[in-house]
C-alpha cells in the first residue's frame, strides 16, 4: 500500500508511520513541523529508506492538492489539525482555516488522485458535547453538539466527508478518538494530561489537578489507536467509529495509577477548575469492534508505565564518552 499521513511528525501520526513502515508499506509524511517534530520520525528515517518520503508543507496551501495528486496514495490518513481547544476559542478563524480548509485541500487532492480512501482523525472528546450521565459511554448515534470551535470544525469535516463520498466517490472512515496518550505526546499541550503528569512525576515536581479531580475521560493508548487506523484503511466504509475503551477514568484515578507506577507518594495540588471543561466523557467502542474488528488492549497501568519510561529515557543525561 502507498499511504500518506498528514500530521505524520506528530505524536499519533509518527507512531502510525512506524507501524505502516514495519508492515512494508510506502509512506509519504506531510507535516509543516509547527507542532510535529522530526525527532518523532527518527526511527522511521533510520529504517524506512526509500519507502519513506517527508514533505514539509502546510495542508492549508493549494500545493497540498497538487502533492496528493502527484504522489497518488491509495489511502490518506488525515491527522494534521489544530488540536488546542483554547486556541480555537481565542482564534476560531485560524482553527477553521487549519481544520476545515486544510481538510478540503486533502479531500480535493484525494479526489484528483483517485484515492481509495481517506481515514480521518475525528474528535470523540468534543464531538458530542456535554452529555447526560446516563448516556455514557456515548454511541455514535448520540447527537453531535460540540461546544468549542475546535469541535465544530471537526464536525464540519465529517459533513464534508459524507458530501465527497456522495458527490465524488471518495470513500472514508472517520475515527472519533477518545483521549489518546502514549510516548511522544507533548507535555506542554492542552490535551496531554498523561504526558504532563509523567513529566512532573519523573522530575519529582508537584502535579496540579484542576477542580476536585472527579471529572472523567476515556484514556486510550496510542498503539491501540494506531491499530484502529490501520484497520480503517480497508474497513468501516462511510462510518464514524468511536475509538476508546468505553471506561471512564477520573483524573484522581489517573494520578493515583501513575503515582503508584512512578513510586511517588506525593498528593496532587488542586487548583480551581478550568471554565468550559467537560465533566464526564467516555466512548462506546462497539461499532469499531463490529466493523473494524478492533478493541483496545492496553491497560492504564501498562500504558502510563510506557509513558513514564519514555520520559525518563528522554530526560536522562547522555552517557559520558
Image (cartoon, grey):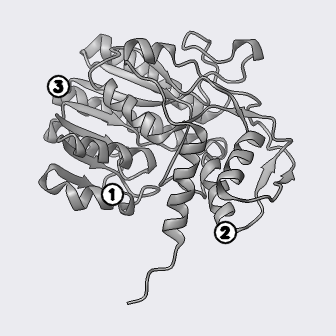
Coordinates of residue 216 in the picture (x, y in percent)? 73, 32
Coordinates of residue 312 in the picture (x, y in percent)? 55, 65
Residue 69 found in image quarter: top left
Q: Which residue is mark 3?
A: 114
Residue 253 found in image quarter: top right
Residue farthest along the bottom direction in this orientation: 321
**Do residues under tags 3 and 2 come within 8 Å of each other at their CB atoms?**
no
Q: Earlier in the sequence, mark 3 or mark 1?
A: 1
Q: Earlier in the sequence, mark 1 or mark 2?
A: 1
What residue do we see at 24% from left, 59% from top? 45
What residue do we see at 51% from left, 51% from top? 306
Q: Is residue 40 left or right of residue 254?
A: left
Residue 84 position (above or below residue 158)? below
How many neighbours does mark 3 have within 10 angstroms: few (below 14), some (14-19), or many (20 or more)?
Answer: some
Coordinates of residue 117 in the picture (x, y in percent)? 26, 24
The mark found on residue 41 in the picture is 1
Residue 294 position (above or below residue 5)? above
User: Nearer the viewer's eye, disc 3 or disc 1?
Assistant: 1
Q: Which residue is mark 2?
A: 203
Q: Which element carries disc 3, helix, strand or loop?
A: loop
What residue do we see at 72% from left, 23% from top? 130
Amino acid at each position: 500500500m502507498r499511504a500518506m499521513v498528514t500530521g505524520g511528525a506528530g505524536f499519533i501520526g509518527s507512531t502510525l508511520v512506524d507501524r505502516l513502515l514495519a508492515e512494508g508499506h510506502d509512506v509519504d509524511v506531510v507535516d509543516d513541523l509547527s507542532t510535529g517534530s522530526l525527532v518523532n520520525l527518527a526511527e522511521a528515517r533510520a529504517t524506512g529508506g526509500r519507502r519513506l518520503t517527508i514533505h514539509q508543507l502546510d495542508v492549508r496551501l493549494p500545493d497540498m492538492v497538487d502533492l496528493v495528486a502527484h504522489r497518488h496514495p491509495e489511502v490518506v490518513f488525515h491527522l494534521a489539525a489544530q488540536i488546542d481547544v483554547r486556541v480555537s476559542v481565542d482564534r476560531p478563524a485560524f482553527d477553521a482555516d487549519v481544520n476545515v480548509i486544510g481538510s478540503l485541500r486533502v479531500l480535493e487532492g484525494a479526489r484528483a488522485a483517485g484515492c481509495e480512501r481517506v481515514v480521518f482523525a475525528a474528535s470523540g472528546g468534543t464531538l458530542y458535547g456535554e452529555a447526560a450521565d446516563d448516556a455514557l459511554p456515548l454511541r455514535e448515534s448520540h447527537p453531535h453538539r460540540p461546544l468549542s470551535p475546535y469541535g465544530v470544525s471537526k464536525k464540519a469535516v465529517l459533513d464534508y466527508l459524507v458530501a465527497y463520498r456522495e458527490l465524488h466517490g471518495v470513500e472514508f472512515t472517520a475515527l472519533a478518538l477518545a483521549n489518546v496518550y502514549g510516548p511522544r505526546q507533548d507535555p506542554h499541550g492542552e490535551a496531554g494530561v498523561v504526558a504532563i503528569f509523567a513529566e512532573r512525576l519523573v522530575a519529582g515536581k508537584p502535579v496540579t489537578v484542576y477542580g476536585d479531580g472527579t471529572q472523567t475521560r476515556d484514556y486510550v493508548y496510542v498503539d491501540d489507536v494506531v491499530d484502529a487506523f490501520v484497520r480503517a484503511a480497508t474497513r468501516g466504509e462511510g462510518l464514524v467509529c468511536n475509538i476508546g475503551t468505553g471506561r471512564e477514568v477520573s483524573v484522581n484515578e489517573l494520578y493515583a495509577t501513575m503515582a503508584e507506577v512512578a513510586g511517588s507518594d506525593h498528593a496532587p495540588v488542586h487548583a480551581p477548575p478550568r471554565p468550559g471543561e467537560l465533566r464526564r466523557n467516555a466512548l462506546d467502542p462497539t461499532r469499531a469492534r463490529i466493523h473494524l474488528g478492533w478493541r483496545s488492549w492496553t491497560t492504564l497501568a501498562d500504558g502510563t508505565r510506557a509513558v513514564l519510561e519514555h520520559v525518563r529515557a528522554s530526560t536522562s543525561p547522555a552517557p559520558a564518552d
